[in-house]
Image: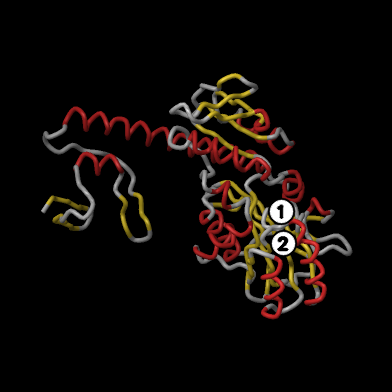
C-alpha cells in the first residue's frame, strides 16, 4: 500500500510518518507549502515544487495549519474517491471556521456552549443585553486560543468590540463556562478516543491551550464524554482529529475541533503512542477501501458483461443510515432503477427482493 502525507513537517507529522513506515509499503511526504493546483484545462493538475505530481496513492492524509485550509480542501477534492482519506473535503471548510463548526455540531445534536453569531460589531453590541455575563468573544478563524477574548461586563465587551470593528469580521459571543481554567482535549481516531488530557490555564489566563502557556495531565473520559467526542468528530466528517470539551453543570460541552492537533503534549501526558494509533487505523481503513474499490470495479465489469442477462451476485457490506439501508451505487446501476419508480419489495428475515412494479 502507498500513502501520501501532506503537512508542514512539524514534530507531530514526523512522528506519524515514522509510524506509517511500519504499516505501509511506501510512504511519501509533501510539504503543503510547496503544492499548487492548476484548474481550467478540463482536469485539475497538482504540482509539487513546480513539477506535476502524477503519482497515485492508496491513502492520502492531509494534516496542516488552518492557514492552508483552501489548498487542503482542493487536495482532498482531487483525491476523493481515488484514495482513502480520513478527513472529508468539506471538513476543511467547516472545522477551520468556528461558526460553521458550531452549526454542524448543533445539527448533529452535539451540545455546545450557547453562542451568538453576528455579521457586524453593531449587531453584536445590540445583542449584549441578551447574554448573561461574563462572556467569551471570538474571531471565527482563530486557533491555538488566539482571537479569544474575555469580557466580564457589557462595558468591557463593548470596548473589545470597538477594537474588533477594525478587523471587519463576523463576531462570536459565547457564554463563559466556569471550569476553573481547565478544558479537555480528546484525540479521536475512528470510533475510539485514543487519548485525553485535561489542560489547565496558566495564572491570569482564561485559555487552557498549551500553546498559551497552559499545563496538561492525562485523564480518563467517562462514557458520556467519549461518545460526545466521537459524535462530534463524525458530525464534522473527520475520522482523525482532536475534540475540545468543557465540563459544565450542564454536562460535557464541545467547544471546537482541530484537524491537525499537536501530539507532543498529549503523548507526554498520556504516555501513549498516538502516531501508532493513527497509522494502524489508516492502514486498516485503506485495506477496506481497496477491497471495496476492487469489489466495485468487479461489479462494474459485471454490469458490462451481463447487462440484460440473469441476476448476478454482488457481495458487499450494508451501509446503514440510521435504520435504513443504502444500496451500493453499482447495485442501483445493475438494476437500472430510477428515482420515484414504483417497486415491489419482497421481505423476509435475512432476505430482500426489489422488483420493478
Q: Secondary structure at mark 1?
A: loop
Furthest residue toward top? 51
Q: Any mark on residue 142, and which?
A: 1
- In the picture provided, is 300 more to the left or to the right than 22? left
Q: Is residue 213 left or right of residue 230?
A: right
- Occupied quadrant, residue 21: top right
Q: Quadrant of residue 66?
A: top right
Q: Determine the residue positioned at 53% across, 42% down.
A: 86
Whether 311 is drawn above or below 219: the answer is above
Is 136 displayed left or right of 96 in the figure?
right
In this view, the residue farthest toward the right is 203
Q: Are marks 2 and 1 in contact (CB under 8 Å)?
A: yes
Per the rendering, the mark at residue 138 is 2
| Figure disc tally | 2
User: Tag 2, which secondary structure?
Assistant: strand
Instruction: Please tell me how crowded label 1 is: few (under 14), some (14-19), or many (20+) other residues with Cα within 10 Å.
Output: some
Residue found at x 76% / y 64%: 182
Answer with the quarter of the image where residue 306 lies: top left
Per the model, the C-alpha gap separating discs 2 and 1 is 7 Å
Residue at x 82%, y 55% (from the top left corner):
215
Q: Is residue 290 above or below residue 230?
A: above
Above or below 293: residue 222: below
The front one of 70 and 347 is 70
Task: Tell which of 118 and 180 is nearer to you.
Answer: 118
Q: Quadrant of the C terminus?
A: bottom left
Residue 299 x %, y %: 27, 33
Q: Where is residue 187? Give x, y as percent.
A: 64, 51
Q: Is residue 300 left or right of residue 51?
A: left
x and y percent of residue 219 in the render? 71, 59
Mark 2, residues whose alpha carbon is within 10 Å: few (<14), some, or many (≥20)? many
* Colouring scheme, one of rainbow, by chain, secondary structure, one colour: secondary structure
Amino acid at each position: 500500500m502507498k500513502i501520501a502525507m501532506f503537512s508542514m513537517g512539524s514534530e507531530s507529522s514526523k512522528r506519524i510518518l515514522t509510524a506509517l513506515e511500519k504499516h505501509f509499503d511506501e510512504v511519501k511526504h509533501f510539504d503543503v507549502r510547496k503544492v499548487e493546483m492548476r484548474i481550467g484545462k478540463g482536469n485539475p493538475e497538482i504540482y509539487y515544487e513546480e513539477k506535476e505530481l502524477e503519482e497515485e496513492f492508496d491513502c492520502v492524509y492531509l494534516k496542516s495549519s488552518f492557514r492552508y485550509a483552501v489548498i487542503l480542501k482542493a487536495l482532498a477534492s482531487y483525491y476523493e474517491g481515488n484514495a482513502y482519506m480520513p478527513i472529508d473535503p468539506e471538513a476543511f471548510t467547516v472545522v477551520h471556521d468556528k461558526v460553521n463548526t458550531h452549526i454542524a455540531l448543533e445539527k448533529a445534536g452535539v451540545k455546545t456552549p450557547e453562542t451568538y453569531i453576528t455579521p457586524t460589531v453593531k449587531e453584536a453590541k445590540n445583542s449584549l443585553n441578551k447574554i448573561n455575563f461574563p462572556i467569551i468573544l471570538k474571531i471565527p478563524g482563530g486557533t491555538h486560543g488566539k482571537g479569544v477574548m474575555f469580557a466580564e461586563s457589557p462595558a468591557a465587551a463593548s470596548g473589545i468590540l470597538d477594537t474588533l470593528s477594525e478587523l471587519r469580521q463576523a463576531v462570536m459571543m459565547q457564554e463563559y463556562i466556569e471550569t476553573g481554567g481547565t478544558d479537555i482535549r480528546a484525540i479521536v481516531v475512528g470510533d475510539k478516543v485514543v487519548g485525553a488530557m485535561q489542560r489547565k490555564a496558566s495564572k491570569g489566563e482564561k485559555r487552557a491551550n498549551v500553546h498559551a502557556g497552559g499545563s496538561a495531565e492525562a485523564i480518563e473520559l467517562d462514557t458520556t464524554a467519549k461518545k460526545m467526542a466521537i459524535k462530534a468528530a463524525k458530525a464534522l466528517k473527520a475520522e482523525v482529529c482532536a475534540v475540545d470539551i468543557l465540563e459544565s453543570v450542564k454536562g460535557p460541552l464541545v467547544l471546537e475541533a482541530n484537524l491537525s492537533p499537536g501530539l507532543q503534549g498529549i503523548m507526554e501526558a498520556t504516555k501513549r503512542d498516538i502516531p501508532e494509533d493513527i497509522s494502524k487505523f489508516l492502514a486498516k481503513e485503506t485495506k477496506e477501501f481497496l477491497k471495496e474499490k476492487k469489489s466495485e470495479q468487479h461489479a462494474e465489469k459485471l454490469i458490462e458483461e451481463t447487462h440484460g442477462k440473469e441476476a448476478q451476485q454482488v457481495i458487499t457490506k450494508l451501509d446503514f443510515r440510521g435504520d435504513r439501508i443504502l444500496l451500493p451505487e453499482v447495485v442501483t446501476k445493475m438494476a437500472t432503477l430510477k428515482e420515484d419508480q414504483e417497486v415491489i419489495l419482497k421481505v423476509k428475515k435475512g432476505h430482500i427482493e426489489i422488483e420493478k412494479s
